[in-house]
Amino acid sequence: MSYQVLARKWRPNDFSEVVGQEHVVQALCNSLDQNKIHQAFVLSGTRGVGKTTIARILAKSLNCENGLDSKPCHECSTCLSVSEGSFMDFQEIDAASSRGVDDTKQLLETVMHMPSSSRYKVYLLDEVHMLSKAAFNGLLKTLEEPPPSLKFILATTEVRKIPVTILSRCQIYDFNRIEINDIKNQLSKAIDLNSKTINFGH
């Protein structure tokens, strides 16, 4: 049996499973269900509050083969490959280690290409505040005139370090810290479900 990191095993796969960020979930679900989707999103909050998780669910919702909806099917090849981290049109980039203008230029050259097999190419730039000034200027040019098939998700723990010119072209979602009771409830569910899968027989 292959081992799976607990954080991945219990990571929400659907907006309905996300805890403590109801305001973010509701706003994104409304946008998806009404097909009024912005070109770029800023997900701002401390570590561990669900920014990357929600970005992945959003990527599924945007590209699910059963239709653009806030409730992806989780069964089509797109949903499965996003969950596995192998979906070609969803790229996760660590801006902390790819912060230079050359890195950004190389990235922006690829975003102009049409998606290989989906509605949208989705780029998640994690810790985006780490980009250099020149890199931000390059990103701004793309945000000013983005291809219709492109979506950017900018995740950050330091939103104040992102230039105002970038923020003005994005929908900004501020994530809450998870309440202690919500954490306890989730841990209880995980422990209960995990115990049911363990065979205690002799």
Image: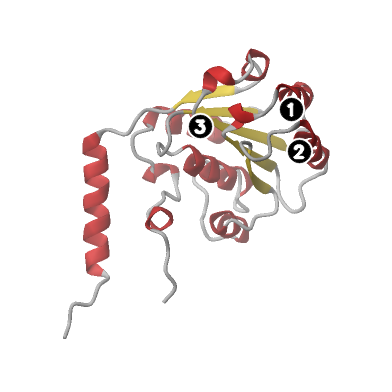
Marker disc for residue 28 = 3
Say whether marks 3 and 2 touch (CB < 8 Å). no
The residue positioned farthest toward the bottom in the image shown: 202
Q: Are marks 1 and 2 in contact (CB under 8 Å)?
A: yes
* Residue at which label 2 appears: 103
The kind of residue tagged 1 is Ala
Task: Please provide percent x and percent y for residue 65.
Answer: 63, 53
Q: In the image, 172: left or right of 10?
A: right
Q: Position of residue 116 (x, y in %)?
A: 77, 52
The CA span between labels 1 and 2 is 8 Å
Q: Residue at x 66, y 29 (%)?
A: 131
Q: Amino acid at mark 2?
A: Asp
Q: Nearer the viewer, residue 142 or 34?
A: 142
**Label 1: few (<14), some (14–19) or many (≥20) C-alpha neighbours in 10 Å:** some
Residue at mark 1: 135
Q: Nearer the viewer, mark 3 or mark 2?
A: 2
